[in-house]
Image: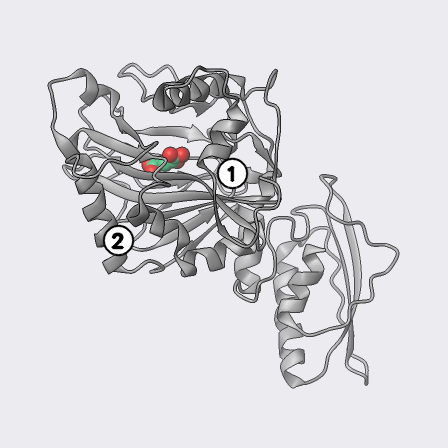
Amino acid sequence: MYFSSYLASVVHFTPVISSHRHTQTHGRSVLIVYTLHFTGLKMSRAADRLKVVLNHLDRSHGAVRASFTSAQNVSYQYHHHHPQAFQYTFDTDLLTPEQRIAYEKDGFILIRNLVSDEDIDQFRKEFERICKKEVKVPGLLVMRDVSIAKSEFVEGEKAVTKLQDFQEDPELFRYCTLPQILKYVKCFTGPNIMAMHTMLINKPPDTGKKTSRHPMHQDLHYFPFRPADRIVCAWTAMEKVHRQNGCLVVLPGSHHGTLQEHDYPEWEGGINKMYHGVRNYDPDHPRVHLEMEKGDTVFFHPLLIHGSGMNQTKGFRKAISCHYASSDCYYIDVKGTTQENISNEVKEITAKKYGIDNTISFQDTWALRGRLVQGERTSM
Ligand SMILES: O=C(O)CCC(=O)C(=O)O
């Protein structure tokens, strides 16, 4: 289904789907045969481009055939094992074929200069107002670095390392509704979009204890909703981020794996609250450091293993992010799964925050936070 909509973005065609078509499954073999009817020169160029793109997608197992006839019919036979054909993205006429394939293959896509300086400056001002307690936001979780929290009193902005759940702050929440962000989000979630999880991360200069690091993890560990492929994170740099101030580090392609066990890493200098790390991952897996300019935005899959390094500068490294999910997603029960540890922790924190007893379910803590930002609230 996703594959056909992808093709439709490149060329206008009448798909004739043969009986060989196996749709999206978690199996490893996909065989799709499409017949495309092209209607002009532009279409042929698009077909050439598509051929190149499909060839990039799979070399060893792929069989991409294009044969033009006098009626300008093109037949593609596409048979591959890895990665699956368009499991992770929808066609919305926005992503180029190359961008779609990059996300399918790597699990992230970086869009430069997506959020304006003016917007980011306003988010920064709002963050300062919150830190100075000029604004009180219901449900907001204000977090402090473990090494700063344990040391001398530090005032205001310098004490705060993360704001979480800012959905009740109209100014910060404006980030989650920016049309240029939602346009991309729709490519991953489809048209019904919920903003589920909001954060402004103010990574502090490391105190020497290496606590400013964020351990490698998969965000899905925190989420009791599925399917994972209909969830995406948008993370926007609020200033230049680079290796020195602890940019994001990702393991490309790790979203093809499953959800791993997570827990607090045993770090000598301590570890921040709720910073669970993935227990086992291949330390030799290639890494990409996402160096970004102010306003650049990365969209990534919730199974992508990622984290961020130590902030070795004197400044606070700021980023704003939102996790979106299709409102067609459904809640799952995490009892007896690897997510039980985080579920208990979140329930406890939420009960404290809202002054309720902790009979609240993990799913309810998310239903409380989620906000529809586009389309219809169908299930979540
Ligand atoms: O901004 C960062 O340093 C990492 C954020 C992150 O991965 C998270 O909070 O899940």
Along the line of sight, which residue is nearer the eye, 163 or 13? 163
Residue 307 visible from this viewpoint: no
- Whole-percent x, y for residue 86 in the image: 65, 53
- The quarter of the image holding the C terminus is top right
Determine crowd level at label 2: few under 14, some 14-19, many 20+ residues with C-alpha closer than 10 A.
many
Query: In this picture, is 337 found above or below 239?
Result: above
Q: Which residue is mark 1?
A: 302
Quarter of the rendering containing residue 156? top left
Quadrant assignment for ligand 1: top left
- Whole-percent x, y for residue 3 in the image: 69, 58
Using the numbered discs, state the Cα–Cα distance from disc 2 to disc 1 in whole angstroms: 24 Å
Residue at (29, 37) in percent of width and height = 201
Q: Tag on residue 120?
A: 2
- Whole-percent x, y for residue 333 in the image: 61, 24
- Whole-percent x, y for residue 107 in the image: 52, 45
Q: Earlier in the sequence, mark 2 or mark 1?
A: 2
Residue at (41, 61) in percent of width and height = 180
Residue at (45, 20) in percent of width and height = 347
Determine crowd level at label 1: few under 14, some 14-19, many 20+ residues with C-alpha closer than 10 A.
many
Amino acid carrying label 1: it is: Pro
